[in-house]
Image (spheres, rainbow, N blue to C red):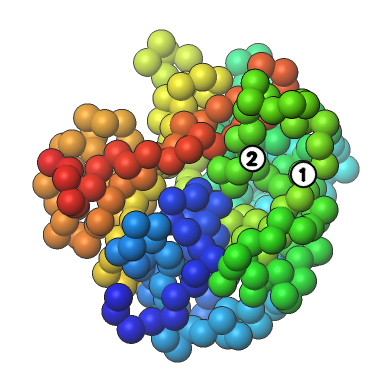
Amino acid sequence: MRDGIALTGLEGTNPLGFLAALGVQVLFDCEEHQPRLWWTDDIVPNAVVAPEFDVDHIVEQALQVFPRWIESPALAPGFGAKSDDDAKFSPGNLRKYLEKTRSYQPGNRLASALVADRSLDGKGKVAKPTDLYFTAGQLKFLKIARDVLAGVERDEIVEGLLGPWSYSSTLSSLGWDTTDDRIYALAATNPATDKKLTNPGAEALAILGLSRHPVFAGQDRRGRDRTFTQGCAGPWRRGGTYTWPIWTRPATPNAVLSLLAHATGRDEEIRLRSKWYRGWGLSQVMRSAIRRSDQGGYGTFGPPVIAWSAFGGS
């Protein structure tokens, strides 16, 4: 491993750990000096950042940045409607929301990773959010994001960065941890009735990491309107996936954005690009299925699999 600070709590095989590692870089978006990010080459890769960004530095930055995100128009739209909490904006408010979040301030980048102009549900009544929007029913995406960023404490951020995760908080979750994929058929009772405990340090950083995954409006293979999310593929309801790269060379935020854009997609796309992956410092490309419940459409990530590996990929 190159010299750096190992963030042993952020595992690259868990989408929550991966998104949280991206969030560490996002913390410094408005700073002159920004951390390079890479991963160990262990069986379970851990995030690593440049040595000048030690854990104390990251935590202090997080405690300053999280409140700014809470106050941003991206997380607090201020329309006086339920979409202030669930991000399912009416067509008129969708345009206003994207206009309000054009200025470059902490948090606003999240808007373009959450909804896209003219990207509406099948009935054309409300905005259709990112594929990584896993909440439904009484769980409201923006409200949970604000609650997590407001409620996370210093020691929970440290735990998120260094682990082990204790799953001791009652703060809500956005559902990106692979442990959320609890299979009812293998449980003695319905897990949906349990009070799920979470790791708000990792959750808070992952909210920032989501902003690295822009969305855009388009049409699926059947010609139906669709919100597409960078890193995701397949239909929204069933058969969707999230794919992400693991790299072992220190990468600046701009380099990470390039890796996220090029080391993702369907198998055929990965095969076409894989001839460059080793040269880019990739060690593997991971993928998790996106599963949604029949009732409500709550999302979870399935167990990760290796879509490509430098040690056996083509």
Residue drawn 64% across the image and 33% down it: 182
Quadrant in the rendering for residue 81:
top right
How far from the left and from the top, in percent, is residue 248?
Answer: 28, 66
Residue drawn 56% across the image and 72% down it: 162
How far from the left and from the top, in percent, is residue 67?
Answer: 75, 69
Numbered disc total: 2
Residue drawn 80% across the image and 54% down it: 171
**Residue topped by disc 2:** 180
Cβ atoms at labels 1 and 2 below 8 Å apart: yes
**Residue topped by disc 1:** 196
| Left or right of 305, for residue 27 | right
Residue drawn 75% across the image and 31% down it: 191
Residue placed most toward the observer, 20 or 129: 20
How far from the left and from the top, in percent, is residue 78?
Answer: 82, 49
Q: Give above or below for 128 relative to 153.
A: above
Residue placed most toward the observer, 151 or 197: 197
Which residue is situated farthest in the right direction here?
A: 80
Quadrant in the rendering for residue 85:
top right
| Left or right of 85, for residue 279 | left
